[in-house]
Amino acid sequence: MSSEFTGKIALVTGASRGIGRAAAVALGAAGAHVILLARTVGGLEETDDEIRRAGGKATLIPADLSDFASIDQLGPAIGQRFGRIDILVLNAGVLGELAPVPDIAPKMWRQVFDVNVEANWRLLRALDPYLRASAAARVLVMTSRAGGEVAKPFWGAYAASKAALEMLARTYAEEMKITGVRVALIDPGAMRTKMRATAMPGENALTLPDPSAIAPLILLAASRSYDGIAERLKCA
């Protein structure tokens, strides 16, 4: 079935599992060609299988977002093959360690900011020409209530990185007002993911929604009808 996403080029980071996989499958099932980016080859292949079962197509790119040189080379490689990016889902992220601010290990702090902030800045930097080449590109940035709404003890590194990412996204959105590029902040809330299980080990995961519940919000934010400037969109 044809939809407004048929033939669009979408890139999803952290696409090997959880919310990233759910977003990729939703876009692929809707007709987009999805570029899947994650570290784990096996996970990428499983996402590819789901997209194919849904009638979609995907391209797999195994990559570590902390390898900044690889990110810098990604833009030209994608541009040469596809010419544009219509939808960019910046989903990949790491939790780091939950600890009091004075006790956060410097190495862990650096890792969290490398993946959650700098890698996303480098992706925007590398892919900006190809987003501008689209008639109506949409950038979806995954965030968290811990990053912009609620300060929680022991979440310092993750929360600070997400707050920084949100401001980066809002700034880019303001800069893109005169173009066809629009930016949305996606707040999925609590979902049945590996990161959530790590953060909340005593929680009954079966009480949480499956990541596939995010699909309608992904398709809304990726659509031409979304014309906002980095609003925070939440799952119901």
Image (cartoon, rainbow, N blue to C red):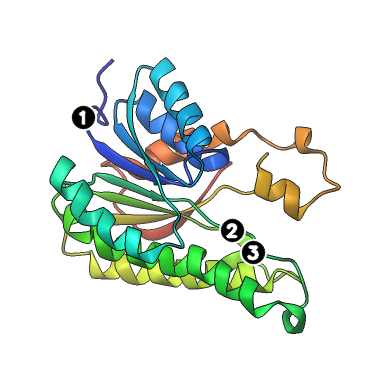
Amino acid type for the residue under numbered disc 1:
Gly
* Secondary element at image label 3: helix
Residue drawn where x is 50% and y is 63% of the image = 115
Residue holding disc 2: 94
Label for residue 7? 1
Amino acid type for the residue under numbered disc 3:
Ala
Q: Earlier in the sequence, mark 2 or mark 1?
A: 1
Disc 2 or disc 1, which is closer to the eye?
2
Around disc 3, counting alpha carbons within 10 Å, would you say few (fewer than 14), some (14 to 19), or many (20 or more)? many
Around disc 1, counting alpha carbons within 10 Å, would you say few (fewer than 14), some (14 to 19), or many (20 or more)? some
* Secondary element at image label 2: loop
- Disc 2 + disc 1, Cβ < 8 Å: no
Label for residue 146? 3
From this viewpoint, which residue is outermost toward the bottom?
A: 102
Q: Is residue 181 visible?
A: no
Q: Position of residue 130 (x, y in %)?
A: 18, 53
Q: Is residue 104 visible?
A: yes
